[in-house]
Image (tube, rainbow, N blue to C red):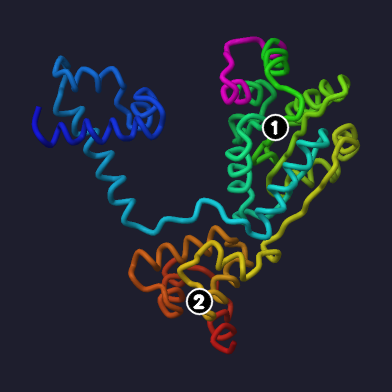
């Protein structure tokens, strides 16, 4: 084995230690742990060069990514704290909570932070257009809880109910995509524990579609869910505060024009995500003062709507 190949194996082992197993590292890279074992012992009968090239490509990409701007994973912003506290409340009280809000304002990061802080009594799933049905939702819950998914729908529900326990919360991101049946299935979990004098909270988090679905024209259909809702949060980009931007981008501390500009960006359809992305791009280009941010915003085709003049006048 060459010195370069030994270095790649060592990098793999370091990643495995970070993730908790070589199997997880292999899945993340795209080279199975069994192949790594054979490469390490020099017993691999396949194309050795090809496998090492996969490792090299992966670690080279990660090395380059490490040189770019790295976003703060979580900051207790105005909106993130509302989402975080909503999950805590519904965990304690049981039943339902709805958090509807504009895209890119920090809802998902708050969910992930809460689950990371409460791994023993919370579970989170994220729906998409292919996983919004009752069976798909049950499968995602089962996967998150380490349960087998090759079961009938009713067996899945009962297996999950048996694994859940008093004082837990189920958080569903992109919940506006859920079908009526999948929402009712989640309600059934909350009812199951309520009937036993226990609590299980369900937090549905998504864009304004979740509110329109449950409180709009189909309100009558969702009456049972509405009756079990403790909180109905409505969050908007206009709720973002300048202090939130400073928390998310601490390198701009004290830089009034830059913070004001990014704050105004965050209150448009771009949201906090767009503001942070704009800063990250400008930072990577080496020009993140006011003029650099404006230039990058134009390169990203953001609609400034007189924003430059408004900020300059402050």
Residue at numbered disc 2: 258
Is 273 part of what is drawn in magenta? Answer: no
Q: Are marks 1 and 2 in contact (CB under 8 Å)?
A: no
> Considering only vertical position in the picture, is 35 above or below 30?
above
Q: Secondary structure at mark 2?
A: helix
- Relative to 14, is 166 above or below? above
Q: Residue furthest left?
A: 2
Q: Report if residue 144 lies within the magenta region.
A: yes
Taking the image as shown, residue 120 lies to the left or right of residue 179, namely left
- x%, y% of residue 48? 15, 24
Q: Nearer the viewer, residue 275 or 1?
A: 1
What residue is drawn where x is 81% and y is 33%? 94
Image position, residue 95 (x, y; %): 83, 34
Instruction: Identify the residue under disc 1.
Output: 170
Outermost residue on the bottom side: it is 313
Quarter of the image that includes the N terminus? top left
Give whichever of discs 1 and 2 has the lower sequence position: 1
Structural crowding at the residue carrying mark 2, measured as other residues with C-alpha within 10 Å and reported as few (<14), some (14–19) or many (≥20)? many
Task: Please name the residue shown 17% across and 16% down the image.
Answer: 44
The answer to whether 268 appears left or right of 215 in the picture is left
Q: Position of residue 199 (x, y in %)?
A: 81, 29
Q: Which residues are magenta?
A: 140-154
Residue at 80% from the left image edge and 23% from the top image edge: 188
Is the C terminus in the top left, top right, bottom left or bottom right quadrant? bottom right
Gap between marks 1 and 2, in whole Å? 39 Å
| Label 1 residue SS | strand
Residue 291, percent from left and from top: 43, 80
Q: Residues within 10 Å of mark 1 (few under 14, many from 20)?
A: many
Q: Nearer the viewer, residue 70 or 103?
A: 70
């Amino acid at each position: 084995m060459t010195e370069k190949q030994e270095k790649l194996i060592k990098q793999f082992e370091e990643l495995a230690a970070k993730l908790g197993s070589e199997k997880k590292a292999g899945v993340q890279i795209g080279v199975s742990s069994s192949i790594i074992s054979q490469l390490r012992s020099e017993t691999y009968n396949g194309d050795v060069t090809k496998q090492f090239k996969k490792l090299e490509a992966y670690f080279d990409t990660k090395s380059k990514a490490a040189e770019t701007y790295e976003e703060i994973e979580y900051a207790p912003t105005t909106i993130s704290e509302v989402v975080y506290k909503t999950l805590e409340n519904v965990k304690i009280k049981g039943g339902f909570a709805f958090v509807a809000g504009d895209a890119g304002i920090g809802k998902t990061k708050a969910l992930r932070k809460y689950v990371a802080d409460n791994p023993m009594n919370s579970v989170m799933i994220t729906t998409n257009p292919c996983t919004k049905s009752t069976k798909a939702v049950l499968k995602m819950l089962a996967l998150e809880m380490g349960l087998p998914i090759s079961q009938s729908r009713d067996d899945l529900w009962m297996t999950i109910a048996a694994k859940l326990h008093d004082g837990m919360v189920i958080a569903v991101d992109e919940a506006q995509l859920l079908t009526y049946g999948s929402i009712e299935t989640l309600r059934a979990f909350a009812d199951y524990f309520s009937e036993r004098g226990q609590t299980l909270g369900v937090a549905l988090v998504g864009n304004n579609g979740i509110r329109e679905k449950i409180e709009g024209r189909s309100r009558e259909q969702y009456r049972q869910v509405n009756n079990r809702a403790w909180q109905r949060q409505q969050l908007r980009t206009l709720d973002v505060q300048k202090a939130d931007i400073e928390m998310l981008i601490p390198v701009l501390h004290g830089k009034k024009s830059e913070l004001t500009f990014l704050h105004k960006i965050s209150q448009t359809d771009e949201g906090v995500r767009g503001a942070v992305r704009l800063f990250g791009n400008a930072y990577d280009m080496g020009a993140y003062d006011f003029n650099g941010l404006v230039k990058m915003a134009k390169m990203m085709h953001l609609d400034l709507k007189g924003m430059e003049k408004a900020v300059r006048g402050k």
